[in-house]
């Protein structure tokens, strides 16, 4: 039997051994032969800022992943942090989750509803040991929203975004914990910390009788723009004026070094050949902070290709062809069902997933293209300005909707991505009927957003004050009412209110 087919069959057909850790009590079933899963997430990495695309930034480990695995040339995320992470963890549309327009900020009490099922919960139920190292950004103020409550056996990292890389503070409060308890790592650069903790998990903490699911969402190269001297010295020709290109390069360099340490640990532990490694960025790079998305148009916060089409790599020894360039469209929404299919794991979500099982797109060069539309949106950083978009086959519509105090301005951009992948020619005037059709589709999609879902809030209410310790500020689960609160929308009143709201959004969550 050919090696690729043998490896694929071993991943899809598993032998389950049931063991006992106490008399009369069955332990978690331990599957044999299932692949380990490692998801490495960069934060704000530019499309062009990797060595294999010609950048002067040194990324030998990412280049190696590209050579030994596959480049996912049309992998789509969302234009900002939180919606990408929520789509990754749930396989569900962040528009429905109320998380699509903006990121959760430290002063917000929002989060992905405890009613949603998270990917590591399914993997843990299938016998996987699960861990997360790095940035969460999916809710923080009650225990039910934190990583250990969403399927991760082990967590080291930060609940918020915009973390200082050296003292781990946000708005003055410390945000670094291990499984709910604050820890201190004075002087350690955050990216180095993430690498060290991921290696510690692989070499010391994980249950070796189980396959593992490891999620490492790095802070880098997201702002604040900070880098260690050892990496800064490698880029003497880059300057930090007018943008911090030197610091940005050093941050990406440090990220690549961290990836290399994790890859080395997998090899040292003897598990590299049975591990699926997925690397991607949560959105495009921000050019004002030194990133480059060339030749793609736009960047982070925008729904042009530079904001949503991101660098992505996948390595699966014996299954994915080395050096392949997979041009089939994949979405961050697809990761949960696809990884579950690859590992023979049953998806435990009671709610239907919006992502698709795209395993065939990874293993078969002749696989059918992705079916269905892909939508994107951002409300950051401008209040009442929305950037929305949809891809439907070869066509993509981008709208910039600017709600002024007394009027609304809409700019339409229509592109044929097959002929114009870098979005240089706007066909909106010559294809007015297609613009109208796709604009209506966007309207229907946006109507799924709860009217009280998160929107841009770049500064807190003046009455907010940061906790000194974010880990200590989490309300324990036993002190929180289990059920959500729907407010004044029950019964006939709710039906009438929804009719009045119409396309403005859902008055009840989901």
Image (cartoon, helix red, strand yellow):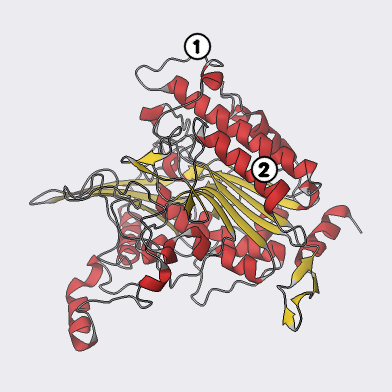
In the displayed image of the protein, which residue is found farthest to the bottom?
492
Relative to residue 233, is residue 189 depicted above or below?
below
Q: Quadrant of the C terminus?
A: bottom left
Q: Is residue 249 visible?
A: yes
Can you tell which mark lies on residue 15?
A: none
Label 2: few (<14), some (14–19) or many (≥20) C-alpha neighbours in 10 Å: some
Label 1: few (<14), some (14–19) or many (≥20) C-alpha neighbours in 10 Å: few
Residue named by callout 1: 237
Relative to residue 387, is residue 347 depicted above or below?
below
Residue located 46% across and 29% down the image = 292
Mark 2: which secondary structure? helix
**Residue 452 x %, y %:** 25, 65
Of residues 402 and 395, the one drawn nearer to the viewer in this rendering: 402
Of residues 149 and 244, the one drawn nearer to the viewer in this rendering: 149
**Residue 294 x %, y %:** 47, 30
Of residues 232 and 325, the one drawn nearer to the viewer in this rendering: 232
Of badges 1 and 2, nearer the viewer stands 2
Q: Is residue 356 visible?
A: no
Of residues 508 and 146, the one drawn nearer to the viewer in this rendering: 146
Residue located 40% across and 37% down the image = 299
Q: Counting residues from the N terminus, which is met first, the one under dot 1 or under dot 2?
A: 2
**Residue 3 x %, y %:** 87, 53
**Residue 485 x %, y %:** 29, 76
Residue named by callout 2: 199
User: Separation of disc 1 and disc 2 at Cα?
Assistant: 33 Å
Residue located 36% across and 71% down the image = 479
């Amino acid at each position: 039997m050919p090696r690729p087919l043998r490896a694929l069959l071993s991943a899809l057909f598993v032998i389950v051994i049931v063991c006992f850790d106490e008399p009369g009590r069955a332990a978690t079933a331990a599957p044999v032969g299932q692949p380990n899963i490692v998801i490495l997430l960069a934060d704000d990495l530019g499309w062009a800022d990797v060595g294999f695309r010609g950048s002067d930034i040194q990324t030998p480990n990412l280049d190696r992943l590209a050579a030994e695995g596959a480049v996912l040339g049309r992998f789509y995320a969302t234009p900002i942090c939180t919606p990408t992470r929520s789509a990754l963890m749930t396989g569900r549309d962040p528009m429905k989750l109320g998380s699509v327009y903006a990121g959760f900020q430290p002063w917000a009490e929002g989060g992905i509803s405890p009613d949603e099922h998270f990917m590591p919960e399914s993997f843990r139920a299938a016998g996987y040991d699960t861990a997360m190292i790095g940035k969460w950004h999916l809710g923080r103020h009650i225990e039910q929203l934190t990583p250990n409550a969403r399927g991760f056996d082990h967590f080291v990292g930060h609940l918020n975004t915009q973390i200082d890389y050296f003292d781990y503070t946000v708005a003055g409060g410390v945000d670094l914990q291990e499984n709910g308890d604050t820890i201190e790592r004075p002087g350690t650069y955050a990216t180095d910390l993430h690498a060290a903790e991921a290696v510690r998990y692989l070499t010391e903490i994980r249950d070796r009788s189980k396959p593992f699911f490891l999620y490492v969402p790095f802070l880098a190269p997201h702002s604040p723009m900070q880098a260690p001297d050892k990496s800064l010295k490698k880029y003497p020709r880059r300057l930090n004026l007018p943008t911090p290109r030197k610091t940005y390069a050093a941050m990406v360099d440090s990220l690549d070094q961290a990836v290399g340490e994790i890859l080395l640990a997998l090899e040292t532990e003897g598990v590299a050949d049975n591990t699926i490694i997925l690397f991607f960025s949560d959105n495009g790079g921000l050019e004002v902070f030194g990133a480059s998305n060339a030749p793609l148009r736009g960047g982070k916060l925008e729904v042009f290709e530079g904001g949503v089409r991101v660098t992505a790599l996948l390595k699966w020894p014996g299954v994915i062809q080395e050096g392949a360039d997979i041009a089939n469209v994949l979405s961050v929404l697809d990761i949960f069902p696809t990884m579950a299919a690859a590992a023979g794991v049953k998806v435990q979500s009671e709610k239907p997933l919006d992502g698709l099982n795209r395993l065939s797109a990874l293993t078969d060069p002749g696989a059918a293209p992705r079916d269905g539309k892909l939508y994107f949106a951002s409300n950051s950083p401008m209040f009442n300005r929305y950037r929305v978009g949809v891809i439907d086959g070869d066509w993509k519509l981008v709208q910039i909707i600017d709600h002024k105090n007394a009027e609304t301005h809409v700019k339409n951009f229509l592109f044929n991505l097959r002929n114009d992948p870098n979005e240089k020619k706007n066909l909106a005037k010559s294809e007015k009927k297609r613009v109208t059709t796709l604009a209506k589709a966007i309207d229907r999609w946006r109507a799924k957003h709860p009217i009280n879902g998160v929107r841009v809030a770049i500064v807190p209410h003046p009455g907010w004050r940061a906790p000194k310790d974010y880990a200590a500020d989490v309300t324990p689960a036993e002190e929180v009412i289990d059920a959500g609160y729907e407010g004044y929308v029950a019964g006939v009143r709710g039906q009438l209110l929804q009719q009045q709201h119409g396309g403005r959004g859902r008055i009840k969550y989901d």
